[in-house]
Amino acid sequence: MMKQIRQIIAGKWFKFGLVALCYSLWVLWLGNYWWLFGVVIVFDLYVTRKVKWAFWKKKYKAGEKHNVWLDWIDAIVFALIAATFIRMYFYEAYVIPTSSMESSLMTGDYLFVSKSYYGPRIPETPLSLPLVHNTTPVLNTPSYVEWLKWDYRRMPGRSKVKAGDIVVFGFPHGDTVLKQEPMQDYYTIARLNGRAQTIHRYGPVIVRPVDKKDNYVKRCIAVAGDTVEVRDGRVWRNGQAERSRKGVQYSYIVKTNGTPVNAKILDKMGVNTHEAEYDSRLPGYTRIFLSDENAEKIRALPNVVGAAQSNDVYPPDYPDMQGLIFPFADNYLWTRDNFGPLWIPAKGATVALTLENLPLYERIIGVYEHNDLRVADSVIYINGAAATGYTFKMDYYFMMGDNRHNSLDSRYWGFVPEDHVVGAPAMVWFSTDQHKPFPTNIRWKRLFNLL
């Protein structure tokens, strides 16, 4: 009996049926039934075997010496195909480059990002080099071609983006990048220095499709249909104060009796001492990032006179000069700490358009949803027709870093469209502190932490 079962399992029809079933389930998840024609290829691979699909792979006769190079090519091709498939639909590796999410996520954290959590996006530029995002490692040229492009579509996921989620997404302003300063926000620099001067100094510009924008990670503060407001640095959503989060921190001014706080005490609290600014003239810290819990611990230290949160009122202080805060219009007297109220656009919702509120929605209308938007003689035109309202085609989100006073987020560039959402961090699999030498730089307690 067991012999017969083993024979059935080893048979070509059983293998074909199992692979065809798994493949068909993937096609159903994908939602594009043209891919069902791939069952024909699976049938040929396991049953008829008429076509040599793995043309690079050599079949050896009994006793024939193996070609090491061909074996390596076969292993590399299989690894690239498998890794590309996993990276495209399930998990992608990501590293935290800045402190905008401290202390929830640390600079130097290496993450696995789950793309299936919110549903993986179908690639809009499917022809690209495997295992790289938007540039080639050595040549620094685009890693993709744009002559084949697909419309935005997302496969079913396990959840929708909710307020409070940590989300990885494409940088909304990342459609235009300065070649000499690719990590800087082109739109911010152009707004301050003028477009011509910006391109002359840092250009030329590179235009990237949605799925090839650089990835950011922030916390979703409000979802489509919500109203968000920041009052004295604290977030309010739909009229309710945001619940206290352990990882959220703010910039504080800490006065001391003339001596700095012991660095070992700060390090034990998890405070980033490399971003703390001590000034003996105060005396104390003109800027130090603390959570509410750590602020109370700091106040209790014997050499600390007082600690107060630094809140920005209008007009915004340096570095948040007027013109850097969304929506970059003189009639919105907002700062990073006193922002809104702002309604988050929802798919299917219609908003009345006026010249006063157009700055809030012009990038959505003209860039994210691909309409021709212009204003002439105080009249708003969309696709050539006068418009007094607009119906949104996508849901949008408002994102903020947990390090609230050291984060470039939706307060500086506005809404995040749903087609920019990449996934949710699933695990910190490795973490290093760039300010410490090996091996003390390894944060052992953060290794393999589930998020």
Image (spheres, rainbow, N blue to C red):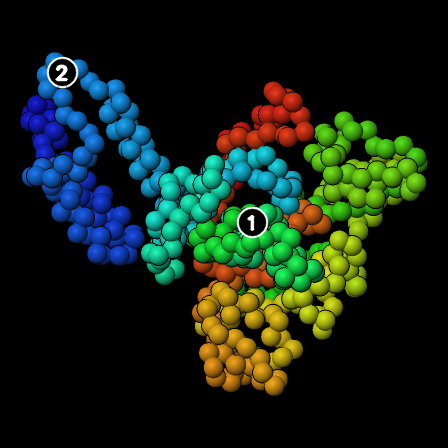
Q: Secondary structure at mark 1?
A: loop
Instruction: Give the Cα separation between the discs numbered 2 and 1.
Output: 53 Å
Residue at x-position 62% and y-position 41%: 98
Residue at x-position 17% and y-position 15%: 65
* Image spot of residue 428 (x, y percent): 52, 35
Residue at x-position 47% and y-position 39%: 139
Which of label 2 and label 1 is nearer to you? 1
Q: Which residue is mark 1?
A: 179
Q: Is residue 268 above or below residue 211?
A: above
Q: Which residue is mark 2?
A: 64
Left or right: residue 182 compared with residue 317: left
* Image spot of residue 204 (x, y percent): 56, 54
Residue 292, quarter of the rendered image: top right
Marks 2 and 1, the one that precedes in the sequence: 2
* Image spot of residue 260 (x, y percent): 86, 33
Amino acid tagged 1: Lys
